[in-house]
């Protein structure tokens, strides 16, 4: 198991991406700290994890990521219940669509607070509890970003601004804590079938074909939390790039799918832009190869 005995804490883990990743981490042997605003949803995720029969520990504590004291208290509970943290996934997010000249000012501020301050609060609250004593087993701080970074969208000014902001935040944190055995990385998905995108219709089986299922993101988080990613720091993982890689892998001759080194020339020849984007993430490409097989 990739994460046996490790402790992973996930904000926004009552539904959507956070729920999917929490269950995936538990299947790989991790003990899980679950936090979001709605206790019933968290308990449902906890029950689902316990019913897996993996024998992992699960701790639940409600918190609003816009209120530092609540996040700080939740993380103290997780530390008491589960021990030092090996990984944090700052996943809670929020968005609304509006014409920018009509955008409610308070709503704009709320989106920025949840999506930016919520990430900062998660790091600040987690820092005293992170395992920082082993350069061969670094703590991981992972942010759920968005492809809105580099691809701004009309009527989503607040959301787009927030996703640009967290990239800057990650850059700063990665530089500041480079010598403290903590890595900072980000997963930037395209549209995902969650309540944030599709409201109460999320998960109804009728999503548009270009919309991802939340479970399709699991591999990226599992990789970043695993020993394979110990030396990867300040990476931006655009899931659209890896979707193209999966497509190419399905078409590549078997001899060129053996590992990253043999696939690399094939990728560079057939998709030079994608190759340029992912050339420093060969271990992730290889990880995905193994999951496909």
Image (spheres, helix red, strand yellow):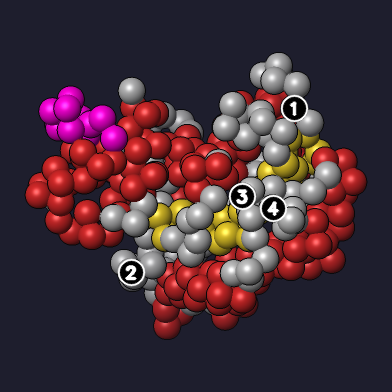
Q: Can residue 23 be seen?
A: no
Secondary structure of the residue carrying tag 2 is: loop
Residue wearing tag 4: 134
Q: Quadrant of the N terminus?
A: top right
Residue wearing tag 3: 136
Q: Is residue 261 left or right of residue 177?
A: left
Front residue of 263 and 271: 263
Which percent across, then down, holds residue 104?
54, 77
Q: CA distance from mark 1 to mark 3?
A: 23 Å
Q: CA distance from mark 1 to mark 2?
A: 38 Å
What type of secondary structure mainly makes up the magenta span? helix
Front residue of 262 and 167: 262
Secondary structure of the residue carrying tag 1 is: loop
- Magenta residues span 249-259
How crowded pointer 1 is (Cα within 10 Å; few <14, some 14-19, many 20+) is rated as many
Secondary structure of the residue carrying tag 3 is: loop
Do the residues under discs 4 and 3 have CB atoms within 8 angstroms? Answer: yes
How crowded pointer 3 is (Cα within 10 Å; few <14, some 14-19, many 20+) is rated as few
Q: Is residue 120 left or right of residue 127?
A: left
Say whether residue 192 is magenta: no
Residue wearing tag 2: 150
Q: Quadrant of the C terminus?
A: top left
Front residue of 68 and 159: 68
* Picture layout, residue 238 above or below residue 28: below
Residue at (23, 60) in percent of width and height: 276
Q: CA distance from mark 3 to mark 2?
A: 33 Å
């Amino acid at each position: 198991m990739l994460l046996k005995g490790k402790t992973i804490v996930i904000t926004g883990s009552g539904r959507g991406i956070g729920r999917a990743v929490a269950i995936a981490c538990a299947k790989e042997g991790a003990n899980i700290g679950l936090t979001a605003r709605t206790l019933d949803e968290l308990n449902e995720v906890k029950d689902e994890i316990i019913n897996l029969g993996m024998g992992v520990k699960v701790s639940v504590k409600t918190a609003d990521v816009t209120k530092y004291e609540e996040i700080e208290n939740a993380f103290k509970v997780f530390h008491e219940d589960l021990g030092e943290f090996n990984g944090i996934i700052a996943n809670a997010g929020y968005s609304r669509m509006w014409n920018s000249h009509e955008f409610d000012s308070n709503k704009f501020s709320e989106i920025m607070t949840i999506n930016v301050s919520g990430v900062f609060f998660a790091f600040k609250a987690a820092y005293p509890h992170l395992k920082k004593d082993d350069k061969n087993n670094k703590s991981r701080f992972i942010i759920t970003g968005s492809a809105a970074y580099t691809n701004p969208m009309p009527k989503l000014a607040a959301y787009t601004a927030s996703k640009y902001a967290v990239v800057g935040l990650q850059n700063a944190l990665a530089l500041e804590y480079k010598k403290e055995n903590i890595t900072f990385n980000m997963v930037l998905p395209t549209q995902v079938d969650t309540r944030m995108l599709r409201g109460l219709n999320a998960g109804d089986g009728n999503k548009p074909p270009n919309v991802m299922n939340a479970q399709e993101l699991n591999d990226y988080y599992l990789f970043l939390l695993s020993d394979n990613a110990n030396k990867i720091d300040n990476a931006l993982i655009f899931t659209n790039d890896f979707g193209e890689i999966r497509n190419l892998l399905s078409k590549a001759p078997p001899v060129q799918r053996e590992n990253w080194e043999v696939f690399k020339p094939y990728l560079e020849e057939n998709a030079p832009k994608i190759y340029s984007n992912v050339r420093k993430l060969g271990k992730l490409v290889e990880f995905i190869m193994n999951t496909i097989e």
